Amino acid sequence: MNNVALTASAGKRLIRASCVALAASAALAIIPAHAAPGDAMAKTGTQYKADADMQVVLDELASMGGKPIETLTPAEARQQPTPADAVMSILKKKGKDTSPTALVPGVTSVDREITGAAGNIPARIYTPDGPGPFPVIVYYHGGGWVIADKQVYDGGARGLAKQANAIVVSSDYRRAPEAKFPASHDDAFAAYKWAAENAASINGDPKRLALAGESAGGNMAISTAVAVRDAGLVKPTHILAVYPVAQTGNLNTKSYVDSATAKPLNKPMIEWFVDKLLAKPEDKMDPRLDVVHAKLAGLPPVTIINAQIDPLREDGTMMQAALKKAGVKVDRKVYDGVTHEFFGMAAVVKDAADAQKYGGQALKASFGK
């Protein structure tokens, strides 16, 4: 499951930790816009309050009648309303143009198939206006390796094409449980290899490649960089990991506790994702999933973006520490008052626009002139 830094602004109030015990009976994970701090704690299981613009999205999503993902089959889960649906609904109610070119002017896209690890896989290629050739970012969507696709994560990928002035190859991949781990990671590596070999054919520069992803895709951006290093392929100039899954072995970190029942991502959902993903329990320790214990030395610089109200927040802390220990340059920002999935919401959430600019500038700087 994308400047504001790690400290909270005056408008983002930390709710007293003594209220944590109330979370055990939480039935809802959305904070009503009118809620008092105590009410917010009782209904969310999180210590933190959503910003007003983030809360509008959460309320809209709640109104769409989705069922808890962890109670559904994968096929049912893939049919539930998404945060992207909520954003589009808000824009339509405001009478806004929701066409891609209106939301992100100066970027066009085309859908096609590229070569995966076991056959072709769908991809969407975003191209900024201008003569090119452009740098190329290979981007992986989130969804716990089980749900979602490139369309659900269109907002983040399209925004990065604009902010980084780069072509973005947003690659789908085989999903679990139909294709267990490591099928998704194999497809992610294949997508990068395809981009390296075919960049010129899409008006890209094969010498300026980068990796990016959100949530499960953030995990694959990092693990793909490791695989690329080991295979001796063209090294990416940068990795952007937005609220990445850094490990699946410890679901009891501080943020898994304080955001256990957050929306749109909570601890039961992640447990459900992991159950569907793994062919055998010991796979959770595979360094492609447990990237905090992978051999990280020699990776390019990494930018990590996290949301405050998110079980994966501390995965970002752990990832940052592991990269620093390996001698890899890493920058990280935690955006207060927003939740998992905020990165693609630039049309309605201020911090999302800021996060896209922050991540895009890091990528753009890595490409040089």
Image (spheres, helix red, strand yellow):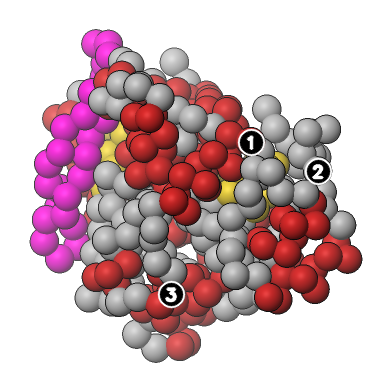
Q: Earlier in the sequence, mark 2 or mark 1?
A: 2
Along the line of sight, the residue nearer the viewer: 288 or 109: 109
Based on the displayed image, in which of its 4 quarters is residue 249 positioned?
bottom right
- From this viewpoint, is residue 237 visible? no
Which SS type dominates the magenta stretch?
strand
Residue 264 x/y as whole percent = 50, 56
Q: Quadrant of the C terminus?
A: top left
- Is-magenta flag for residue 244? no
User: Considering only vertical position in the picture, is 67 above or below 172?
Assistant: below
Q: Circle 3 sits in a helix, a strand or a loop, which is it?
A: helix
Q: Is residue 135 magenta?
A: yes
Between discs 3 and 2, the one toward the N terminus: 2
Q: Which mark is residue 90?
A: none
Mark seen at residue 52: 1
Residue in the foreground of this view, choosing between 214 and 190: 214
**Relative image position of residue 17 (x, y in whole percent):** 85, 62
Quarter location, residue 22: bottom right
Q: Secondary structure at mark 2?
A: loop
Front tag of 1 and 3: 1
Which mark is on residue 70? 3
Amino acid of disc 3? Glu
Residue 51, quarter of the rendered image = top right
Picture disc at residue 13: 2
**Residue located at (34% from left, 29% from top):** 92
Please tell me whether mark 1 sits on a helix, a strand or a loop: helix
**Neighbourhood count class around disc 3 (C-alpha, 10 Å): few under 14, some 14–19, many 20 upward:** some
What is the three-letter code of the residue carrying label 2? Arg
Query: The magenta stretch spans which residues?
Result: 108-137
Drawn side of residue 345 relative to residue 200, left or right = right
